[in-house]
Image (spheres, helix red, strand yellow):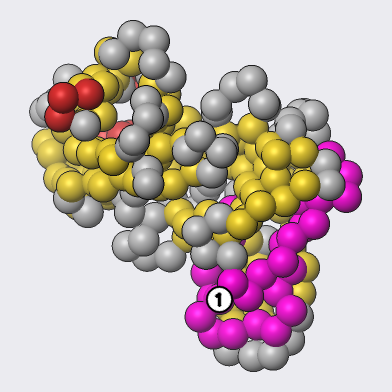
Amino acid sequence: NAGVTQTPKFRVLKTGQSMTLLCAQDMNHEYMYWYRQDPGMGLRLIHYSVGEGTTAKGEVPDGYNVSRLKKQNFLLGLESAAPSQTSVYFCASVRGSSYEQYFGPGTRLTVT
Amino acid sequence: AQSVTQLGSHVSVSEGALVLLRCNYSSSVPPYLFWYVQYPNQGLQLLLKYTSAATLVKGINGFEAEFKKSETSFHLTKPSAHMSDAAEYFCAVRKINNDMRFGAGTRLTVKP
């Protein structure tokens, strides 16, 4: 199993540009999560999904959108990037009956 | 509301010394609590979890944590630090709607 993969690993955007981050998992997990990690602030939940076709807002959802059209994929979109969205983004997945989150390797995004 | 507070953003111990990383939670219902470890430039890895079974939870790499309801604490300990334990550690709580909240993290340094 590849586990949880994230695409791309690095990206530099200009203010106002858009992009989509892809998270994929091959473990047939029901739940998927998107976090951002900033120094001194730990991980903050952006959006999450408890099943295909469902999404919910987390702690810091503004400026982001998500979609879960397929169970194995969870997409995070930035419609108009801002420098405040410079961060490392992590995706995670969870088997519904368990509580362990499996994390991807992260995407480092810089918005100039 | 459920959240976690990690006391001390940076802890330094000598090799062989006791490791104690502190986490306090606030929760209106019995919580699910976790400790994760992050090595440089990697995603997070689960160390251990509390899901309302035994109050003393043993995890990987010799770590353990004790759930104390009266103190609303879930501190992480290891009797003898090893150089390879140097990393950042995060406490987290899972909310009833499957939302996850992480603490700000504690960076552990191990001195030879």
Coordinates of residue B93 in the picture (x, y in percent): 41, 37
Quarter of the rendering containing residue B77:
top left
What quarter of the picture does the C terminus of chain A occupy?
bottom right
Q: Is residue B18 above or below residue A17?
A: above
Coordinates of residue A57 in the picture (x, y in percent): 61, 57
Coordinates of residue A51 in the picture (x, y in percent): 77, 38
Coordinates of residue B27 in the picture (x, y in percent): 33, 37
Q: Residue at x 81, y 50 (%)?
A: A68
Q: From this viewpoint, is residue B47 visible?
A: no
Q: Is residue A71 above or below residue A75?
A: above
Q: Residue at x 88, y 44 (%)?
A: A70
Q: Is residue B16 left or right of residue B93?
A: left
Q: Is residue A32 left or right of residue B107?
A: right
**The disc labelled 1 sits on which kind of residue?**
Gln
* Nearer the observer, B8 or B25: B25
Q: Residue at x 62, y 43 (%)?
A: A92
Please tell me whether residue B17 belongs to the stretch shown in magenta.
no
- The residue stretch that appears in magenta: A62-91
SS type, badge 1: helix
Q: Is residue B24 left or right of residue A77?
A: left
Residue positioned most to the front: B28
Residue positioned most to the top: B54
Residue denoted by label 1 = A85
Q: Chain of mark 1?
A: A
* Nearer the observer, B76 or A61: A61
Q: Is residue A61 left or right of residue A26?
A: left
